[in-house]
Image (cartoon, rainbow, N blue to C red):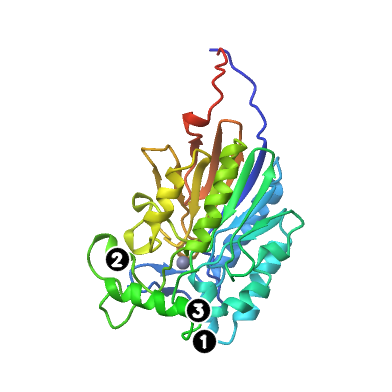
Amino acid sequence: MENCPEQPPLFTFGVIADIQYADLDDGYNFTRTRRRYYRSSLQLLRNARESWLESAVKPEFILQLGDIIDGFNKGHDASDRALDTVLAEFSSGPAEVHHVWGNHEFYNFSRSALLRSRLNSTLHIDRTVNAAPADRDIYAYSFSPFPGFTFVILDGYDVSLLGREESSPLYKDSLSLIRQHNSNEDLNCPVFEGLEQRFTMFNGGYSKVQLDWLESVLTSADENKEKVTIVSHLPVHPRSTTPICLAWNYDELLSIIRSHLCVVCFMAGHDHDGGYHKDKDTGVHHLTLKGVIETPPDSNAFGTVSVYEDRMELRGSGRVKDRVFLFPSRLQDTDQRAT
Ligand code: ZN
């Protein structure tokens, strides 16, 4: 086989998850099994930013997969200060940032405050976005960074006990749903069995309004032969994460993904141990990115993704592994080139 010169990517982008910065000494996770490096996470974000700045092909955008600051900031009256600190780090970076919302955003801020904040990327990027219905306070939108490619940011806490007023119908529906599956007094404690473990307060789901909007985005992407990457804080494939971190109605989202040819990849955070699974029916890649917050100060946790006509290549740093995501063969050009 001939040694072909390396093709440049069409474009690249950066990914980073679960920074959970706080100006606090190290602590532990909920079950006290994993160390959390609250202060050091800022330095790890800085390492990511420097790497993206120095890369030969500058990233077109950065995906911040949620939980940008830790919930502990709230109790120290430090939410705004911590957010300023991490966003200052991002603002000196190489590209626009698409912020995803996780549970820790809601520990610090109300939904209405988040919609007005710098974490609402639709207000702060120059690019045209296609947003979810404006009559509902859902934070979901799509954008196209390059012809033929679409990215969809989803709101994993649209149906949730977090960020919803206790008097609202959405809160009441969420409470009754979670109560059908979780009998613990503390709803942050999962039940012990299988997929039911996902019904905790730190997870959430996607409303019918949001799923209908997603359907319409994917239908038009199918028609236009786009390649779509969906991004959410919560993973939706049970084999890409521990069940404790799955979205409540992961199955509904999975069946929508499976019914459209255009989806090539689903990216999430939330599960700090990360995970990966290629859906055997569709060839869609489900990546759960390892979290910065549980990454030791002498390591790293971010990635740079190079996008080509037929694949995406994730170059991981530190705990994030390199991976190649070949686009499903149903999307490939039938024209086979000789090698
Ligand atoms: Zn989370």
With respect to residue 112, does 195 lie above or below? above
Counting from the top left corner in percent of width and height, residue 74 is at: 54, 83
Residue 330 seen anywhere in this rendered image of the structure: yes
The amino acid marked with disc number 2 is Gln
Q: Dot 2, crowdedness within 10 Å: few (<14), some or many (≥20)?
A: some
Mark 3 or 1: in front is 3
Residue beneath disc 2: 197
The amino acid marked with disc number 3 is Arg
Counting from the top left corner in percent of width and height, residue 2 is at: 57, 13
Q: Dot 3, crowdedness within 10 Å: few (<14), some or many (≥20)?
A: many
The circle drawn on residue 164 is 3
Question: Are circles 3 and 1 on residues that touch, CB within 8 Å?
Answer: no
Q: Residue 272 vs residue 90: left or right?
A: left
Residue at (55% x, 75% y) in the render:
22
Q: Nearer the viewer, residue 224 or 121?
A: 224
Mark 2 or 3: in front is 3
- Quadrant for the C terminus, please: top right
Q: Residue 39 vs residue 80: left or right?
A: left
Residue beneath disc 1: 75
Task: Quote the CA–CA distance across marks 3 and 1.
Answer: 19 Å
Q: Secondary structure at mark 2?
A: helix
Q: Secondary structure at mark 3?
A: loop
